[in-house]
């Protein structure tokens, strides 16, 4: 069969391509020829901009003498032999110098030592990322790292970032396979630092990034947040989409916070913080209390009874600070009744179409430190578990604008009530812990390797179903502790609300009568008049 001739539009395409190539070549040649002119023009534009900026910065009273001096200089140059030519040459030379291309030269590549480290890392990955049946393996003995390591970065001779490809048959969906590769990269990249591993299962890519230590110089202070927002601590810059100004050892700077949102529209209205002794769980509750007092009222139950919250006693907005079993039980029972009262008030206001009253809209915070210690005391004395009194605030606190924050030791999690574990969707774990322990508490594995140095307040946080974030709690020590730094104590004392004359009309809960069948320890220290004060019968222990 005879071939048909191609249409004329197709036969003329090579001429168009040739014309386009000629035009591009001519433009490149003109650019090369006019490169000195372009450079001088760019430099003269910078000179004009500099002169305009200098004229704008010059005070008005000095502009006249400046013009006179410039005119005198021009006259002197004009009267000199060859003066105008020399002046024009000097201006052109300075313009050429200012308009030169200052783009830094591209790096020549890794040094000999860096090349050796990349090759050693490549050979170490061969047993994990290769298969005997692969006809064209990416990872093979005596292979080259250049075909799999697309991006790399060294800082101080140590690997800071690495982007690598791996074969499609690698089981990147299995946690054990990924853990083996991560452990190898952690060991070869250098221990003593934290690394984040970002797996791109769709494109078979893995990115290793060395993380800088979280700052530990941030102390308790007023953070710029909206009502209902609480700063738990600070994390990596790329992990959150927000920063707040903070004051630290290097002055004021922006830091990325971990913000916990409470209120009727929150999906994680209650918090559970776990850690070993000395890891900063009490400091976290103290930081939450200082932020909560700006817009709400606070009730504190100290199960350890060590007086860590003594600085809050008698402060405006602090409804109670209790440490004994009877006082803590009475306070939690009042909190349950207050939650029920708020729920009833909200329901009635919605049915009648009326706005909710101010005392119901004002947030109420229930901070409980070490409730398992109170549980053990209650079991020893044959009394009800105080944790059962948290059932109503935990289940219905979101609608009543009541938030509960609980802190306890990690080895006492078995003694926590089921309602506490089920209703606390915001989780924080502090201290040096194994990755499996962090996953057990937060419900998801951490994306970073464990830290070698764990200061107080260092750990991980997860809000609801969000990602696991590194966390550093701001330093919030007990201001009555003489062993902490004086600057930190002053920072906490400066945040504590002071009693004013307008708030001096607080009312104390009366003691139970002698004929009362139950003995009640002093209930909350002071209750403000704008809050609902329960009767003695409501506070008595059954």
Image (spheres, rainbow, N blue to C red):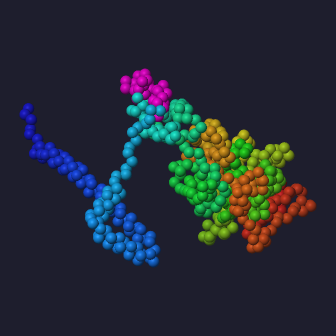
Give whichever of 393, 285 is nearer the camera.
285
Q: Quadrant of residue 495?
A: bottom right
Tell me, yes or no, whether the highlighted magenta stretch contains residue 116: yes
Q: Quadrant of residue 335?
A: bottom right
With respect to residue 483, does 414 lie above or below?
above
Q: Nearer the viewer, residue 281 or 322?
A: 281
- 317 lies above or below 518: below
Q: Residue at x 38, y 67 (%)?
A: 51
Q: Position of residue 446 (x, y in %)?
A: 57, 41
| The C terminus - image quarter | bottom right
> In this figure, what is the number of numbered marks?
0
> Percent x, y for residue 457?
66, 48
Please identify the quadrant where the N terminus is shown. Answer: top left
Q: Residue at x 34, y 56 (%)?
A: 97
Residue furthest toward the right? 514
Please tell me which residue is depicted at 51% across the width and 54% down the height of the picture: 241
Residue in the picture at 19% in, 46% down: 21
The one of 332 and 6 positioned closer to us in this rendering: 6
Q: Does residue 306 lie above or below 51 as drawn?
A: above
Q: Position of residue 492 (x, y in %)?
A: 71, 59
Q: Which residues are magenta?
A: 114-143
Horizontal side of residue 66 vs 263, given as left or right:
left
Residue 288 lies in the magenta stretch: no
Furthest-left residue in this view: 2
């Amino acid at each position: 069969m005879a071939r048909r001739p191609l249409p004329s539009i197709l036969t003329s395409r090579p001429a168009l391509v040739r014309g386009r190539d000629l035009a591009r070549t001519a433009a490149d040649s003109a650019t090369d020829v006019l490169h000195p002119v372009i450079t001088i023009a760019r430099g003269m534009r910078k000179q004009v901009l500099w002169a305009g900026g200098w004229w704008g910065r010059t005070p008005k009273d000095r502009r006249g003498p400046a013009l006179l001096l410039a005119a005198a200089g021009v006259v002197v140059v004009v009267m000199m032999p060859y003066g105008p030519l020399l002046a024009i040459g000097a201006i052109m030379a300075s313009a050429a110098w200012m308009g030169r291309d200052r783009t830094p030269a591209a790096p020549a590549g890794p040094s000999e030592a860096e090349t050796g480290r990349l090759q050693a890392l490549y050979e170490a990955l061969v047993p994990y990322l290769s298969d005997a049946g692969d006809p064209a393996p990416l990872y093979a003995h005596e292979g080259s790292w250049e075909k799999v390591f697309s991006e790399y970065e060294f800082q101080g001779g140590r690997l800071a970032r690495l982007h690598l490809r791996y074969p499609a048959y690698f089981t990147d969906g299995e946690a054990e396979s990924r853990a083996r590769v991560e452990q190898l990269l952690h060991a070869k990249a250098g221990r003593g630092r934290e690394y984040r591993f970002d797996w791109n299962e769709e494109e078979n890519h893995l990115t290793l990034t060395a993380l800088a230590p979280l700052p530990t110089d941030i102390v308790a202070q007023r953070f710029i947040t909206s009502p209902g927002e609480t700063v738990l601590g600070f994390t990596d810059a790329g992990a959150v989409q927000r920063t707040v100004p903070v004051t630290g050892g290097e002055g004021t700077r922006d830091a990325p916070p971990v913000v916990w949102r409470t209120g009727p529209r929150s999906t994680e209205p209650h918090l559970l913080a776990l850690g070993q002794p000395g890891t900063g769980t009490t400091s976290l509750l103290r930081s939450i209390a200082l932020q909560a007092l700006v817009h709400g009222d606070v009730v504190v139950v100290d199960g350890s009874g060590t007086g860590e919250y003594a600085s809050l006693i008698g402060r405006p907005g602090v409804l109670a600070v209790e440490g004994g079993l009877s006082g803590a039980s009475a306070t939690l029972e009042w909190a349950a009744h207050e939650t029920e009262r708020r729920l009833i008030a909200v329901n009635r206001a919605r049915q009648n179409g009326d706005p909710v009253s101010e005392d119901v809209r004002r947030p109420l915070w229930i901070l409980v430190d070490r409730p398992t210690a109170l549980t053990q005391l209650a079991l020893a004395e044959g009394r009800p578990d105080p944790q059962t009194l948290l059932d109503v605030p935990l289940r219905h606190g979101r609608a009543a604008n009541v938030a509960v924050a609980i802190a306890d030791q990690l080895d006492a999690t078995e003694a926590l009530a089921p309602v506490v574990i089920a209703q606390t969707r915001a989780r924080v774990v502090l201290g040096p812990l194994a990755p499996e322990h962090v996953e057990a508490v937060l419900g998801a594995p951490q994306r970073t390797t464990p830290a070698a140095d764990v200061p107080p307040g260092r750990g991980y946080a997860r809000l609801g179903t969000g990602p696991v974030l590194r966390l550093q709690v701001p330093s919030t020590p007990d201001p009555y502790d003489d062993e902490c730094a004086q600057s930190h104590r002053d920072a906490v004392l400066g945040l504590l609300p002071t009693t004013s004359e307008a708030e001096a009309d607080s009312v104390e809960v009366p003691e139970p009568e002698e004929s009362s069948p139950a003995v009640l320890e002093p209930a909350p220290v002071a209750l403000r008049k704008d809050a609902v004060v329960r009767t003695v019968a409501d506070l008595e222990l059954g």
